[in-house]
Image: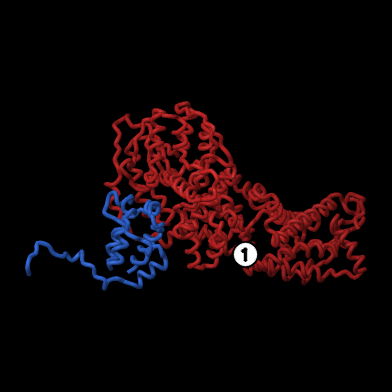
Amino acid sequence: MVDFGFGLVPSSRINLDLFDKQKYEELASVEPDVRKCMSCGSCTAVCTAGNFVTTSLREAIESIHNGQPGKALEMLGSCQLCGKCAMVCPRGINTRHLILSINKIYGKI
Amino acid sequence: MIPMSFILAAQAAPEVIDRIPSGYNHFVIPFCVGIVFFLIWITVGCIRILLNIPHSDRLRFWKSLVSPVTIYKNLRDLFCDCLFHVKIWKRKPLLGYMHSAIAFGWFMLILLGHIEVALFVPKRLGISRSALFYPIFYRFFVWMNPGHTTLRGWVFFFLMDFFLLYVLSGIALAVFKRFRSLALGMKHTTKPSLADRVALYSLWLIFPMRLLAESFTADLSGGSFLTIPVNHLWHLIFGDKLWIMPSWWCYSICLGLFFAVMPFSRYMHILTEVLWILLRNAGIKPNHPRKGVAEAEIYACSSCGLCLDACPMNVQKKNLKYSSVYFIRFLRRHNERKINDIADKCLMCDKCHALCPVGVDAPALRRAQRATVNESIAYDYSYLGSAVPVHTATEGNAPEVMYFAGCMSHLTPRIIKSVEKVFNAAGVSYVFADEGGGICCGRPLMLAGRNDAAAKTIAANKKMIEESGCRTLVLSCPICFKIFKEEYGLKGVNVVHYTQYFNELIASGRLKPSMGRERLVYHDPCELGRGCNVYYEPRAALSQLATLVKASKEYDESLCCGGSLGSLTLDTRDRAKISETAVSSLMVNNPDKIVTACPLCLKTFSESVANSTHQVSPVRVVDFAEAISESIGN
């Protein structure tokens, strides 16, 4: 194979086959706000835990869309539910309940 | 008829003659069936509750029953809460009269009935077949010797009639309240369940039936100002054919029915309340939403519905179903889905708990319910150890104060700036604990029912504070304040909210605010007021720099701003409605500024005021620290 000097590492490939539509709909029925996210990243900017470890609600939501709920759960493991993200969210997403719901729905495997 | 000649009993034949030698009549059967069923139910229930609480708590309970302090507290609470309903009297006098008329009046009727039997027919008390019902139907079984009524007997006749009238007036008010609750000060009332209805109607009937039965027999067994005239009336209407037996049957059936449905109705609180007060005063807290102490607590709820008007969510009628009274009803019915729904919706403002006449701590039960669902969520807090800033003090050189701003204050830095300005102006040496960002205090986790996770953040923060050597910890967020005070167990550290600390600085003369001309209204944040009982200090400090005006709801009746972290599922629109109501309550006296002492309230009110279009002059929302720092100049 020709070496172009760069390549796709497996971790950045998105495999939409892994996207679990049923679980996502379950999440959306429990917390419809998940559909409101526009990935602005305000939540990540203010995150208390994000000050110390790599964590981001924005990325967690994206990971779910990309069929990587494991990554989302790992990120949200450090969340302290302080609610700063809810205070800054321009879309008024109920972030604390969203985080709890993601944990509950994707956590039970 | 009572001849008003008070002859001493010793002079003549006995005053009271046991009319029916067997001391029994078939009409007592319905009452006996009802009361026996009820007594078995409550005995089994009590034993179950006591067996279900942890051993250490049970020991604590037995000990509390013999400790003089708790005995005093128990007696006081039993009289004030169960019989006289002092808490309701204070808030809604007419409602208080209604409740105490039925509770205290009925209690006195039962007590006096037993005393009468003990004095006049003592053989029917104690261990005898008739002890169960005889004192209740005393008037049926005796014949009063008309020529020998003593003063003692006359006093009893009078008291019994008096308390019967007292109860009847309460019942009349209760019936009236069913149709026009607003007249008694209640906007919303609880929707009764089927068992509630049966119990309610039989309760309403018990006392009119008693009057009927006792007035029919009044010329045999005596009576006083109420039963005698009514007896004459019956004689006028029916002549000599009085319906004595049917009326006593009806009375007995009503009583029996009431006791039989009592365990399934709201009226179970009459006796469970006693157990709950004893458990509560022993300091036992529920750790499960339904088992053990919680069971006593949920059955102590009288479904009175005072929490309906109290709940800030109920500015919208659709949210009535999330009130504590329904939460407890569904807990009794084991309706898991509805229980979770209601538990998650609550703002945890604690107002229902503060206003509850029985002191049922519904928010604590909701937290326990949330824990059953959320406690098992996995978390990874391995980073906490390195995340917490280190403030190691050199020996004897620790700053006077440690200031912990908390997550929320970092989003409203004007609070932090003002606090620092005040510290500098007063010459307070301080260390800013989470200047570069700290970790959460743990309260939001606890509110979501994740106590294990909260314990981790608590431990990390605690270590930081203890290592700093500071003896005073000042907090600018009431959410942090509550948990630092209650859960951290910081020995030798004085945990204060900045309203308390600044008030102290002013009182000791270290801070000299100048008096302005503005009119301020102070908003009691839930976690600070009802949560930590801090009402006085912020007002004392603010009255040094401006004129304080009143809000329509303040102190423990203060309304939640709507921004509370307590609710997990309440959406933005519903929250905005709550904020609007809270702001209009604060604006009744047209203040120039709304002052609050919580970063969440500050943000919520600022947004609500900015969004409202109908206000004539814009009001400024400021934080307590800002108000103080503005008054001390530069």
Residue B541 in picture, x, y percent from top left: 51, 34
The tint of chain B in the picture is red
Residue B549 in picture, x, y percent from top left: 58, 39
Q: Residue at x 65, y 55 (%)?
A: B186
Q: Quadrant of the N terminus of chain B?
A: bottom right
Which chain is home to disc 1?
Answer: B
Q: Is residue B239 above or below residue B86?
A: below
Q: Quadrant of the C terminus of chain B?
A: top left
Q: Which residue is disc 1 drawn over?
A: B191
Q: Is residue B140 visible?
A: no
Q: Is residue B347 left or right of residue A81?
A: right
Residue B517 in picture, x, y percent from top left: 54, 32
The kind of residue tagged 1 is Lys
Disc 1 residue crowd, few under 14, some 14–19, many 20+, Cα 10 Å? some
Q: Is residue B208 left or right of residue B400?
A: right
- Which SS class for mark 1? loop
Closest to the observer: B296 or B582? B582
The tint of chain A in the picture is blue
